[in-house]
């Protein structure tokens, strides 16, 4: 999938290009602000490190210190599990097993049997979208007793699962429309246009696009070097991020959120799905700049 414009304002990565070649949409791997970083790339909404850091830290505080991974067998799943495993072991936890599954799997029964037999306290799903939804539904049908953790979860996934199935699940997100007055106002405007509430992808795209366009206006030019300079030096303060900043490795640092899925009894409306557990400050959510492998970072 590619973008037909010189600039792709993506939740995973924004691009300010010197040419009109179409950039590819990429997965949220931390490689984008590591070895694969570039002077015109911005990794905006979330990445595999931030998603794993918030959830693993929360689970460890509850004594959930042994994990079995179900990993989507492609680059995204590998990156997500890789970051989660490093964070988990650094916190004193352990990975007791892993099973890989193909993209767009429909039958998770054998994977769930392996998870059950592992004795792990947590079954961590290093996948997304339909794979995540199918795995959770089948785990519930299977009667899996272990705690199920999703490492990349969207509001739309919770809608697909239903609160009866998803209730109590804890995960990390970059955005939910229920956070405050600003996020709710954006959510309602989006809902009026699209017919559903925005996910963190939708919110990240809108915020990143506006930051880019405002940088062009402030710079008075479309020159990529001037625009990138303005984007980096201008704090991001909108419905998506408060005091967000773009580091020299291209990572946009902002607060992340640990949330929990409401029970049907707690929900007051159709899209009232999540409650905030805690705010994860940006400096704690994302990989430290000192640990970056980006060649643009001054050591």
Image (cartoon, rainbow, N blue to C red):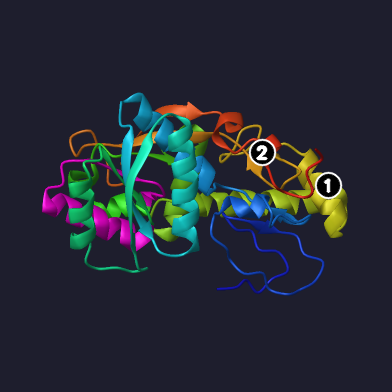
Q: Secondary structure at mark 1?
A: helix
What residue lies at 61% left-to-right and 30% top-to-bottom? 283
Q: Which mark is residue 291?
A: 2
**Residue at position x 37%, y 29% in the image:** 60
10 Å neighbourhood of mark 2: few (<14), some, or many (≥20)? few
Q: Is residue 215 above or below residue 280?
A: below
Q: How far apart are labels 2 and 1 at the CA level? A: 23 Å
- Residue 127 against residue 2 in the figure, above or below: above
Q: Earlier in the sequence, mark 2 or mark 1?
A: 1
| Displayed quadrant of residue 263 | top left
The magenta segment is 128-155
Q: Is 289 one of the magenta-colored residues?
A: no
On screen, residue 160 versus residue 296, left or right, reads left
Image coordinates of residue 73 in percent, x first then y, are 40, 64
Label 2–label 1 contact, CB within 8 A? no
Residue at (29, 68) in percent of width and height: 105
Where residue 199 sits: x, y (%)?
44, 51
Question: Would you say residue 276 is visible in this rendering?
Answer: no
Q: Which residue is mark 1?
A: 229
For the N terminus, which image quadrant?
bottom right
Judging depth in this view, the residue of 30 and 191 nearest the camera is 30
- Left or right of 294: which side holds 259? left
Instruction: Name the quadrant of the C terminus.
Output: top right
State how many labels appear. Answer: 2
Relative to 209, is 29 on the left or the right?
left
The quadrant holding residue 298 is top right
Q: In the image, is residue 137 part of the stretch drawn in magenta?
A: yes
């Amino acid at each position: 999938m590619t973008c037909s414009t010189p600039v792709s304002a993506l939740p995973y990565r924004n691009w300010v290009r010197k040419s009109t070649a179409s950039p590819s949409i990429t997965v949220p791997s931390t490689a984008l602000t590591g070895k694969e970083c570039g002077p015109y790339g911005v990794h905006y909404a979330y990445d595999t490190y931030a998603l794993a850091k918030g959830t693993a830290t929360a689970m460890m505080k509850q004594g959930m210190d042994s994990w079995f991974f179900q990993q989507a067998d492609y680059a995204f799943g590998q990156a997500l599990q890789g970051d989660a495993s490093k964070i988990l072991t650094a916190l004193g936890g352990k990975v007791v097993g892993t099973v890989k599954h193909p993209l767009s799997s429909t039958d998770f029964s054998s994977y769930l049997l392996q998870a059950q037999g592992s004795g792990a306290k947590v079954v961590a799903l290093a996948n997304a979208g339909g794979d995540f939804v199918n795995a959770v539904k089948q785990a519930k049908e299977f009667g899996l007793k272990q705690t199920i953790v999703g490492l990349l979860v969207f509001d739309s996934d919770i809608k697909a699962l239903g609160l009866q199935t998803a209730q109590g699940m804890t995960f990390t997100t970059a955005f939910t429309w229920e956070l405050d007055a600003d996020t709710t106002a954006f959510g309602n405007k989006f809902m009026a246009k699209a017919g559903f509430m925005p996910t963190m992808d939708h919110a990240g795209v809108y915020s990143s696009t506006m930051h880019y366009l405002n940088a062009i206006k402030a710079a008075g030019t479309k020159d990529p070097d001037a625009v990138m300079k303005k984007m980096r030096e201008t704090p991001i303060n909108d419905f998506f991020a408060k005091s967000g900043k773009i580091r020299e490795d291209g990572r946009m640092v902002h607060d992340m959120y640990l949330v929990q899925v409401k029970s049907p009894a707690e929900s007051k409306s159709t899209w009232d799905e999540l409650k905030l557990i805690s705010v994860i400050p940006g400096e704690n959510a994302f990989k430290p700049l000192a640990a970056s492998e980006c060649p643009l970072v001054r050591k």
